[in-house]
Amino acid sequence: MRRVLLIVLLAGIMLCPLPALAVPPDYAGGINNEYQYEEIVFLSGEPIKFMGSCDVSEKGNGDLKSISYKFSLEPEDKGIEGKLDRRVTYETVYSKYAEQGQTTGQTTVKSCRETVEIGDDKFVLEDYQFSGSDVIDNRPASDFNSGTLVARKYYLINKDEGTALLDISGGTSGYSNFWGRTETQILDYTLRVDRTVVLSNEEGDEEDTRKVSWEGSARVLVSDSTRKSLLYSANNATLSTIPGGHMVVTDREMFSRYDYNLPRMNDGAPSGSSRDKGQIELNTEMLPQVARLIIPKFRDIGGHWAEEDIRRLYSLNVFEGDSPFFLPDTPMSRADFIMAMVKSCNIQVQAEQNSRSRFGSRTKTQETSPFRDVPVTDPRYTSIKAAVERGLIKGSTTGYFMPEQSLTRAQAVTILIRALGFEHNAPAPGYSTQYSDDASIPDWARDSIYVASNIGLIEGNGNRIYPERVMTRAEASAMLVRFLNFLERDLQEDYREDIVLYQ
Amino acid sequence: MLGITIALLLFVNGAAQGAMTGTMNGTLEGYLLYIEYIQENDIYLVAVEDYTGEFYDLSLNPGIPVIIDTIPVSPADLRAGLEVYTEITQGQITRLEGYSTSQPGYVSPGSITRQGVVTVIDGYQIKVRLDSGQEETYALAPFTLATRDGAAVPLDVLYAGDRVHLYFDELNTTLVGRIEIQGDSILVSNIYRGQLEAVYDIHSDYMLTDVQVFRNGSWQDHQAMMKIPATYGLPVYLSGHQVPSSYLKYYRSKTIYVVGKNILGKESMDRMIIRNQYEYCYTGKVNKVNWYGGAFEMDNKQNFAFNEGSILIRNGRLQDQYALNSGSDVCVMADGVGGTRMANIIYILNEELNNSSIGQRSLLYGQIDLIEQDGFWLKDFYVLDDNEWQAQHNDRHLFYGSDSAICNTDEQVLLTPGEFWAGDYAIDEDSDYAQDLDLEDWFAYIYTDGDHVTAMAVREEKDALEEQRISTGTVQRTEDDELVGWNVYLCDARDWSNYKNQWMNKSETLRINLEEAVIIKNGVLAEAECLTAGDRLYLVRDDFRARVIIVK
């Protein structure tokens, strides 16, 4: 019990949770840090950067959540008189599909109020229609989400001088796991303004009113990304028991890019047929959060090729124990690897362990293990049970898990790919992998090996993959660190850089 | 057991009656007719019809391997009608395989992807250094869809040094179905020199002091102090050796060179070199490259070593070492003492009309002879070859269509193909009509894709080509001047010297007028206002006035 509590404590202290929000605020392409929010407004026909405050509050849990934004902004250019006030609340109803491990969300706007003043013009939001829907695939190591939205804002200009109609459509892509979360939105705006303008003569006197109509468009790409990374920090003192150690640094960064196409404006009216096309980029970061980790003191990993990987995993408490020897070149057991995977993915098992201990057997029916060779009293039972429940490992037809058996490369890769839920990304059955020892890949591992190779999680050795080769503890550590890098870095690149830099 | 079998037979459809298989051994292929789990016996009852029409009643133990198309499944996943192969011992199935997939090995189009940097373009074959470090060869086809910044572009916009995302439509193919080319974020925005003041590990930020920027062929003061973030996995080198990022704090006050790129709305450090000794800067032509020795010789017999840490920039992009060739015009920033010099930065100045060997673009100048409905003849024409106008002593037949941009630059109007055909741009100069009206054939600058006219500028008067210059440079800014119209300011400009056969750096920013110019961007005609800061231009100019501008 003490040991379990210690694990919980360590996990809580060392690995600070990610911020609750990792989605760009609202659907205006704006970004914010701790102090300031900024977005580009096109209602006047010219791109104007507004800056100010943004308050965000979230309510609800489970199947119903609402999020409210309150913006109070002014133009960055002090030569422009203006003000933007917006209050909007979105409500999302979630439906869970347990069999498929998926969740869908339907988002609607619950309330909205918006006023934009630019120069002498005042745009008042008369109506806001919004429909958004997301699907979230809940996988053991990470959740992946994809969404679509359409919206329409209808503004009155100076009460009776005209209207502005802003159509928004687009989609979102994102992921969320213990090591990071990113959401990238691509939104297409089309703006149509029909209004009267007062024309001035050369002396500047008001001369005539004229009806003008114009259309503009903008493509907005906005990304909010949070990532945890492991950094090493050396100790400047030499007479110390701490030679240096790792820390988890949590960064959050937002980026936005507006590609706009507007008429060239002159006194509030389009001037000729030429267009004003351009691009504006915004970027902001929040202060990183740091958390130092414990320091491994193994005697037998110095100079080993996997030393750095082993130190990292031990610092993260993925490997535990107080032995001074890690034994890097001995085989990794199936049970040890599963326990390490469960911790790497931050799959919650401690809570269950606690509740089992607290309530005892009087309030629960006698628990039976899915495996004959892993009794419920085994200290590894909860991790193995969690792995079965999350689909990392499957119940054996023979009823045995064989926890002490050595782990093979094929088994390890299969577990990693199941954790990501990527096994369905393989081709239709009946294909061969690129490896020359494809024939020795077990049928149950072919999809995982194909996918892992395709996403760069594993590499062959001289065009062979050696699926049945036993993995040493060092090799398994290297594979786990690569897996953590995938969760931390590769997913971020795919959901942010690869969308932003190529679109 | 007999009772269960009887019960099963009652369920089997129609008159099907299974053969008693209690002692059956061997294999059986056919259709699965029926499967049911009998809980009290913990066994599945299975009925199979073989291909000859015989029926068999078998039992299947839950522990027996069952697979469909090589994927292990549970017996509960089996359905009547499935074609199966079974191995049987004493009437019990010991292995069951089902076949369901109609297209084995099918992948949805575009679902296989690779990412990396193009290292070599050889016609429609490209070599890509993948993120895993491997170099692979892939094939492009004329139908391969290319996009850049999300918009479709012709394949010839691709450069060596571009980062690409390749999409394949089939398994085990090297033919690229779609290629996404990274946008302007691939371009080197600036090269800085400064003293390393501080290293902020947690942010991956670096503070530099006395910062200078390499502009117009020399170091120019930029900022007294500058903070710049690093990209992930920033490679840092000192005298050809990689320096771990954790050691950088020990190099405070050392002079460093930094390559900046604009990524995600901010300028970030993409490469860093720590200067070890003294700086030497040379501009000239590479005479010889010794790949084995890792050295090259300039035309003035100066020798420089280079290594994997040397930064090589061409066409605004970071390149691998093999982009360096004998004959390259380069600006070298080297590090060393005495005659031993290590090239830290090698800036290749060469610029060509075509980005790579995929392109078949050419720039012609000549007199229009005979205009047909969809084509015309050009006589006494010149072709821009190796940055020089070369006279061709023959005629050339070119084709135009509705997607050809034809501009009368004398009157600043765009012509439709019909107007061009019907106009007096080519005329029988000996005819009475021509002589009465004093008409002559017009002259044209023509930008072609093979024999097809992409864009052309027609002018009544002949230009003196020998007075023209071929220049390149990077757009600093544009302006719409009230008196002379649109101008562009180019930094890092250079002119081609016919005499020296070499690109010559200009030390000042170049101001060029665009009013009579044909501007080509992404392979199509563009307006002056489409030029943006950072665009790299290749231009034909008559002193202040540009004639043809190609955005590279």
Image (cartoon, rainbow, N blue to C red):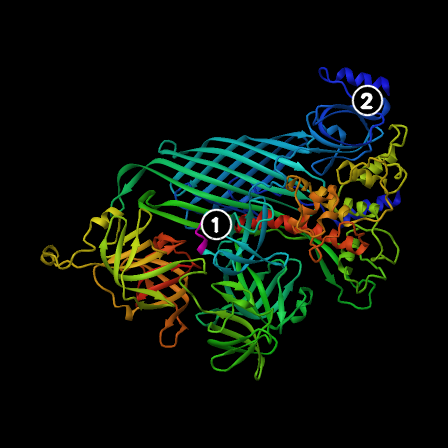
In the rendered image, which quarter contains the C terminus of chain B?
Answer: bottom left
Examine the structure image and report whether residue B153 is included in the region drawn in magenta: yes
Residue A197 locus on image (x, y percent): 32, 38
Residue B377 locus on image (x, y percent): 26, 57
Question: Marks 2/1: CA distance?
Answer: 64 Å
* Residue at the bottom extreme of this rendering: B338
Identified by mark 1, the residue type is Ala
Q: Tell me the chain of label 1.
A: B
* Residue at the front extreme of this rendering: B52
SS label for mark 1: strand
Examine the structure image and report whether residue B492 is included in the region drawn in magenta: no
- Point out which mark residue B25 bears: none
Mark earlier in primary sequence (2, 1):
2
Identified by mark 2, the residue type is Met
Q: Is residue A159 above or below residue A228?
A: above
Residue B472 locus on image (x, y percent): 39, 65
Image quarter of residue B49: top right
Magenta range: B152-156
In the rendered image, which quarter contains the N terminus of chain B?
Answer: top right
How many residues crowd around disc 1 within 10 Å: few (fewer than 14), some, or many (20 or more)?
many
Residue that badge 2 annotates: B20
Residue that badge 1 annotates: B146
The residue nearer to you, when weighing A17 against A178, is A178
Q: Is residue A108 above or below residue B232?
A: above
